[in-house]
Amino acid sequence: MTAHNAPYDLAVIGGGINGCGIARDAAGRGLSTYLCERDDLASATSSASTKLIHGGLRYLEHMQFRLVRESLAERDVLLRSAPHLVRPLFFILPWAPGLRPRWFLRFGLFLYDALGQRQILPASRALDLRVDPSGAPLLPAFQKGFEYADCWVDDARLVILNARDASRRGAVIDSGTRCIRARRDAGGWCLTVVSRDSSRERDVWAKVLVNASGPWVNDVMANVIDGASSHEGLRERVRLVCGSHIVVPKLFSHEKAYILQHTDRRVIFALPFEDDFTLIGTTDLDYSGDPSDACCSGEETAYLCAAVSRYFRHSVCPSDVIWTYSGVRPLYDDGASASHTVTRDYVLRVDRSSDMAPVLHVFGGKITTYRKLAESALERLREFFPDLGPSWTEVSCLPGGDFDPVDFDRHVADLLRAYPFLNARQAHRLFSAYGTCVNDLLGDASCWSDLGEAFGAGLTAREVQWMIQHEWAHSADDVLWRRSRLGLRVTRKESGALDAWIRSQVS
């Protein structure tokens, strides 16, 4: 195997936010890029976040100032590049007697404002919860608090849009394809892959390999990539931490969120979710075993219910829970004793043992800093690509994001005028998902029936066909739980009919 045999400059294992972000950046710099993902894009950790683009207010307690500063800068970058997916969200922080003192919270928010430089979002402010509407859902004991701004994101769609942008710049996105072996010599890498549609093995050749397999990073190092002994020290530095979330009927009618201090000094978020629900999370527990098996335990559900019930007039019980989800994060083990204090920073390691072809391993990170992680990964690989183009993603929008964030509501109104058969809720959902690409999706439709078969909750054949053709959807789960959140609204019968229809289209 020699370098001239490699049709790709870069091969990426893993179709989560980091893998797709790296593929996008690489393709935009002129590298021929291949990405394989054994399941659906964003099918694991990257669709199981708390849906926030934020600096991480609590990271200040652990003196992670660089991470907070970088995260806040990235928050503004993402708000500009994907304003349909990333939108401002105001957080209410009630002061709880007996926990962190009020002056401490005020100082932390002052520092948060200063690190963020407030280019787009407003500064934090103190609140009297006895008179402010955001205090109405809370118990009377919570009289003082603060408000600050961060952003909400549709995490799985952010992955999809990075994959779409990578693809339109020439990258090959090979979802549903597992890498079972990666062999190397001085000239490059040979990846043996198997797709879900065939048991036949095939080889993919590349000069450089990136292991962005998320919580499977250890498994890929040990069982897929050759030279396992050279990775031994890295495998010892990976700490798997599982975070679980619950969804309940909405606890408050406004569109602000809450960040709540718990008695164990952790913080719990309560977020408005899909109009009719409240999302509560997250837990942080050390995890062992297959990350695919992660689920929210009864103990975690009870913990989250108890945490929010300390604050809200309407207490939450496990029987109120409509949906749960869990994701395993592959954090870089910095020696912290408690899982919730382990750094969320990312670490990149390049291994080029004995002058063999290089592999870059990705550890840790958070969805907020994925773009910066990708940019840093490409810079680490620059020595292997002398003609690598300059960084570019900071000033480039993602598909559908070519509009000013302040014009979001105007674009929704324009959509309603262009397609008067839509109602306001449908128009808002479609523009939130597709941005300015929504007109390509709806095309020349003049009535609802022009969009084809209806599958419930406003989902039509026209939209599903778009997801199949442009977003690598292969099943009802792909459509209902990652490319939309409509799984909360459709019946089991509707889901089954959708799955059968999709399989008839992709077979």
Image (cartoon, grey):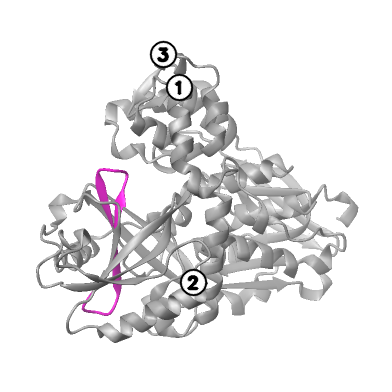
Nearer to us of marks 2 and 3 is 3
x, y percentage for residue 460?
42, 23
* Three-letter amino acid code at the position of disc 2: Leu
* Three-letter amino acid code at the position of disc 1: Tyr
* Three-letter amino acid code at the position of disc 3: Ser
Please tell me which residue is depicted at 25% across the width and 85% down the height of the picture: 101
Instruction: Name the side, left or right, on which 435 lies relative to 356.
Output: left
**Circle nearer the N terminus (1, 3):** 1
Q: In the image shown, does 117 or 204 lie closer to the viewer?
A: 117
Q: Is residue 227 above or below residue 49?
A: below
Please identify the quarter of the rendering in which residue 336 is found.
bottom left
Q: Residues within 10 Å of mark 2 (few under 14, many from 20)?
A: many
Q: Is residue 471 above or below residue 33?
A: above
**Circle nearer the N terminus (2, 3):** 2
Q: Magenta segment: does it hold 133? A: no
Please tell me which residue is depicted at 49% across the width and 36% down the height of the picture: 411
What mark, if any, has residue 196 been given in the picture? none
Q: In the image shown, does 155 or 492 lie closer to the viewer?
A: 155
Please identify the quarter of the rendering in which residue 142 is found.
bottom left
Query: What span is in magenta?
Result: 262-279
Per the model, the C-alpha gap separating discs 1 and 3 is 12 Å
Instruction: Name the side, left or right, on which 230 lies relative to 73.
Output: right
Q: Residues within 10 Å of mark 1 (few under 14, many from 20)?
A: some
What mark, if any, has residue 419 been given in the picture? 1
Nearer to us of marks 1 and 2 is 1
Q: Magenta segment: does it hold 277? A: yes
Residue 332 visible to an observer of this rendering: no
